[in-house]
Amino acid sequence: MPTILILGATSDIGAAIARLFASKKFDVQLAARDTTRLITLKNDLSIRYGTRCDLYTFDAIDFFSHADFYGKLQPKPDVSVCVFGYMNENEDVAKSVSETLKTIQTNYTGAVTILNTIAEDYALKKKGTIIGISSVAGERGRQSNYLYGSAKAGFTAYLSGLRNKLFQNGIPVITILPGFVNTRMTEHLKLPKLLTASPEEVAQCVYKAFQKKQNTVYVKWYWKWIMCIIRLIPESIFKRMKL
Ligand SMILES: NC(=O)c1ccc[n+]([C@@H]2O[C@H](COP(=O)([O-])OP(=O)(O)OC[C@H]3O[C@@H](n4cnc5c(N)ncnc54)[C@H](OP(=O)(O)O)[C@@H]3O)[C@@H](O)[C@H]2O)c1
């Protein structure tokens, strides 16, 4: 059976991806800071789908542990999905060096260091798929969310470069841009219903993108056009807007 690695498996989106791939007969490796929180999901996947499910401790901002973490995975995953992320109120982040570092290091540096390790292995084997959950927040800096957004912009650019590099090795690198999603990360926000996806919709999008070896996918198609318009607004107007 093929194996999928979920980095950030305590997330609502990560759990939904794990469930969907298990239902498609994938073995699952769940990685998170606190693996005790994954026991219910592991048992559920094993009982419901008869899948092999292993738990691994992983901290995105413990950069120097990433090579060891990947070395311990048995077997090496066929598909690796980078789901973890961190978002706090922009103003609170801007006032705090530790929050600023946490935002940049979780969403960008940690994602890059673990995916560099995985990419090296996949390139040698000429086998594997890398999927990153980035964000439309990375498409243009907005005053309400530019710290998280700029870290995600970096991650999107990284995935784009990695895709370009690994194409010659036959390794698909897929960027998922979810728009708003109803999860623990956004539970304090009032999200517009029409623009908001469920974690299960994100998981369906990830599975379809994996099957079709897509490049960059917006979970709800209209986000592509919303972001296209937002990118086209001239800076002289954009800077006056309260977005
Ligand atoms: N919700 C949205 O509207 C939305 C939109 C666009 C993109 N996204 C992205 O989707 C992904 C999943 O987020 P979500 O919405 O499902 O939110 P979530 O439930 O809050 O998930 C965030 C995940 O990141 C993990 N994480 C944070 N810091 C970590 C670290 N240092 N090491 C390892 N794991 C760490 C958290 O682990 P703990 O449980 O240990 O805290 C949690 O599993 C994120 O990359 C997010 O940026 C979300």
Image (spheres, rainbow, N blue to C red):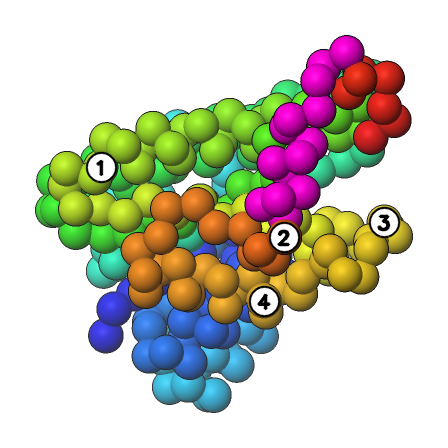
Contact (CB < 8 A) between labels 2 and 4?
Answer: no
Residue named by callout 4: 201
Q: For the point 25% across and 58% down, which residue is it?
A: 78
Percent x, y of residue 233 = 71, 24
Q: Is residue 65 above or below residue 75?
A: above
Residue named by callout 1: 166
Q: Is residue 55 left or right of residue 187?
A: left
Q: Which mark is residue 189?
A: 3
Residue depth check, mark 2 versus mark 4: number of the one nearer the observer: 2
- Give the secondary structure at mark 2: helix
Percent x, y of residue 42 = 49, 73
Q: Amino acid at mark 2?
A: Tyr
Q: Nearer the viewer, residue 33 or 96?
A: 96
- Distance, label 3 to label 2, CA atoms, is 21 Å
- Please give the range of residues in magenta: 223-236
Residue depth check, mark 1 versus mark 2: number of the one nearer the observer: 2
- Distance, label 3 to label 4, CA atoms, is 19 Å
Q: Is residue 65 visible?
A: no
Disc 2 crowd, CA 10 A, few/some/many (<14, 14-19, 20+): few
Give the mark nearest the N terminus, 1 or 2.
1
Percent x, y of residue 180 = 70, 51
Q: Is residue 120 above or below residue 92?
A: below
Q: Which mark is residue 222?
A: 2
- Distance, label 1 to label 4, CA atoms, is 27 Å
- Magenta region includes residue 193: no
Give the mark nearest the N terminus, 3 or 1.
1
Q: Amino acid at mark 3?
A: Leu
Q: Amino acid at mark 4?
A: Glu
Give the mark nearest the N terminus, 2 or 4.
4
